[in-house]
Image (spheres, rainbow, N blue to C red):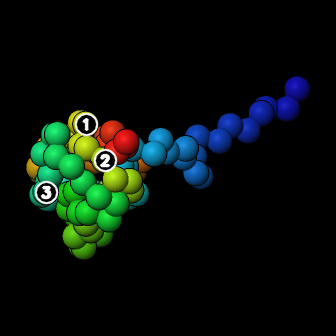
Amino acid sequence: MPEERKHYRQLYIQVEPGEVYAFIPGNIMDIFVKKGQKVKKGDALLSLHAMKMDNNICANIDGVVEKINVKKGQAVSKNDVLINITPAN
């Protein structure tokens, strides 16, 4: 029986509306929001340093910051959920 090829790399990930994730591995340089803070779509949430560049990661929806899953200086991997946002009603 031929060996089945297994794919470990995930090309696309399913993202929940309030999940803000790392699109590339890097280090968290700064966090601009606090838990409970109201944000609007496009607001800068944190700064991710990757490939010699600082990238501002922005809110993908209007809402309230529910949980911050990272700390300043922390190394993160691609697709790690950095911040959870509860959608505005």
Q: Is residue 53 above or below residue 4?
A: below
Residue at image coords 12%, 45%:
34
Between circles 1 and 2, the one closer to the viewer is 2
Between circles 2 and 3, the one closer to the viewer is 2
Q: At which x and y percent is residue 41?
A: 34, 60
Q: Is residue 62 above or below residue 89?
A: below
Residue at image coords 42%, 47%:
79
Q: CA distance from mark 3 to mark 1?
A: 14 Å
For the N terminus, which image quadrant?
top right
Q: Earlier in the sequence, mark 2 or mark 3?
A: 3
Rendered image: mark on residue 66: 1
Disc 1 and disc 2 in contact, CB within 8 angstroms: yes
Q: Is residue 22 above or below residue 42?
A: above
Rendered image: mark on residue 32: 3
| Amino acid type indicated by mark 3 | Phe
- Nearest the camera: 8 or 53? 53
Q: Which residue is mark 2?
A: 63
The answer to whether 60 appears left or right of 2 in the picture is: left
Residue 31 visible somewhere in the drawing: yes
Circle 3 — which element? loop
Residue furthest out toward the top: 1
| Amino acid type indicated by mark 1 | Glu
For the C terminus, which image quadrant?
top left
**Residue 8, picture quadrant:** top right
- Sort mark 3 into few (<14), some (14-19) or many (20+) by Cα contacts within 10 Å: few
